[in-house]
Every structure is written in C-alpha cells, then in structure tokens.
Image (tube, rainbow, N blue to C red):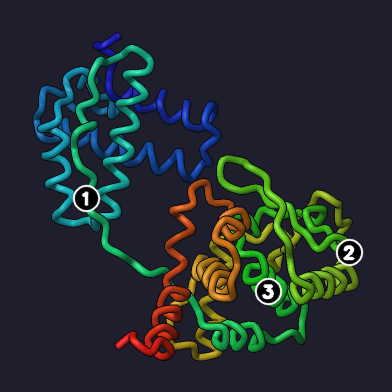
Amino acid sequence: MSSYNLQNLIKSYVEFLSSEKGYSVNTSRAYLHDLNEFADFLVQSGIRGKKKQNKTYDFKANEVRSLMIRGYLGLLYKKNKKSTIARKLSAIRSFFRYLIKHGIIQNNPAELIHTPKQEQTIPAYLTVDDMFRLLDSIKTDNRLGLRNRAIFETLYSTGIRVSELAGMNIFNVDFTRSMIRVLGKGDKERIVPVGDKALRAIKVYRDKLLRETDLQIKGDGPLFLNKNNGRLTPRSIARILDKLVKECSLMVPVSPHALRHTFATHMLDAGADLRVVQELLGHKSLSTTQKYTHVSIDRLMETYDKTHPRAL
C-alpha cells in the first residue's frame, strides 16, 4: 500500500472529498489544484520522482518528508499571501491524514509544521447609507432593471452567497412565510428569512417576466434569468454589480461577497446574536462568523470612551 503513486492517491482523495464528504465542485477542484501543485514541486525539484508526459508521477506517498514540505512552503512565501500558504498547507495536512486513516502511510509529515500566522483582515462592507444608495440607484424601467433590483435586494436581505442565489429556483421562495430555501456548501439546505422589500422586488420582476415572454415557466426553473432566458451565473451577477457600483459612484470596491459581509455586519451592529447570524450565513464554525464583529466592537469602544467617566 505504501508504494502507491502520489498522483493517483491525490485523485482518490479528491474523489473521496466529493462523494463521501459532500464537498462542492469548486472546493474539490481547489484541493486538486493545491495537491497537484505540491506533487509537481516534488518532481520538478528532482526529489526521487520523474515527471512523465502523461503527468503521472512515480513519487511515492511514503517518501514525502517534513523537510520537503518546508521547502515547498519556502517557495510559496516568495509569491503568496499567508492565507494562501495556510490553505495549501491545510490541504497537504488533511491529505496525509486521509492516507494514514486508510493505512497507506504511518506518519503525517505535515502534522508538526506550523500554520503561518494570519494577518488580521477586516472584510469589505458598505455602510448602511452606501448600501441604500446602491439599491436605490438601480433603475427599474425595464425587465432587466427589475431583475437586478430583485437580485441585490435579496442578497442584502438574506446574506446568502452569490452562488446560492444563482442556483435558486422559483419554488425556493415562500412568499407566504417570507422564507427562502437555499442549497449551501456541501449540498446542505437551510431556510433563511427574507424581507418584504426583497420579496416585493422578486414578485414584480417575475410578473414582468411572465407578461413579456412566452416562456413556459416551470416551478423548478431558475428564479433569475439572463437576457437569453437561461440561468444567471455568479460571474454575470458580479459583472452586473460592478457596473451598478460605477454608475452610482461608490468610492469603495464592492463584490457580491462584500454584500454578504455587509448583511452580517449590519445585523451584528444592530444587536443580532452571533449564533443567529452564523445560522443565517450557513457557517459551520462560529469563528468564521466572528470576523464580522469588528464594527460592533469599534462602536462599543467609541461609546465607552465617550461616556464612561473614567475611560480616559
């Protein structure tokens, strides 16, 4: 078992992530890219392996040593952020854990290698005024404008991922209960509340769509359509947002994911419980949600400094 080809084991591991762990296509692809990059480094560095024309590596899993991984990380430090290096190291570490679990190797050469200390980054977000300015600037004098208004009202109202919104179908929206059903990472479903303004925007858009097209709209069809009446993609939504941001002259970079940050920040700043926001966002870990508390903490300290008689 320990003589298994490293490249074949990588393929088996990524298939395991997809079929057994339920990882998304994008996540599985990222693991495959990172692990192939590491295997390629071993071969190109002349460490026992030899790269063949069909990209099959004869390097064996039990030949990998901690020093080799450290050499790879040293190369990454020259051109990658610490967060990227940490992600790639995590992929390597979990890959070797998988090999240990299946009896292919006995020791994890990445286990004792420390993860790079991460920079404290504050997620990009819009203020309440800027968010309202963006939404109110969307022209609704045609069907595509109504669609765009519905899209971004929904993203801000729910905090869902842009991929989750793009994947939504008509019957995922419950107008009676003011809820939507989304399919998140790992194909996990969750129910998320949605505000009246977003629901009204969706209804107005869908009514306009039905009046102006001859489409036989099915209940399981896409909720948001492109100009050719196909499903709108996350990339297309990002391009639409970029155009809208330029048109209303916002001075900060905005992406669909920044609207998710904005939702979380505004909820927490208004007093929402951290665990409630965690559930709404579909975060597996509470620590992932905690990065959105920066504004609340900043305002808390500002209020403390202004009001406490012994603060200064």
Quadrant assignment, res 259: bottom right
**Which comes sooner in the sequence, label 1 or label 2?**
1
**Which comes sooner in the sequence, label 3 or label 2?**
3
For label 3, the residue is 153
Does 67 appear above or below 238? Answer: above
Q: Amino acid at mark 3?
A: Glu
- Residue at 14% x, 55% y: name it: 78
Comparing labels 1 and 2, the label whose residue is closer to the camera: 1
Q: Which mark is residue 116?
A: 1
- Residue at 27% x, 15% y: name it: 105
Label total for image: 3
For label 2, the residue is 214
| Alpha carbon distance from label 3 to label 2 | 26 Å
Give the residue at the far front of this rendering.
310
Q: Viewed as shown, does residue 265 lie left or right of 47?
A: right
Residue 75 at what x, y percent from top left? 13, 47
Residue 88 at what x, y percent from top left? 29, 43
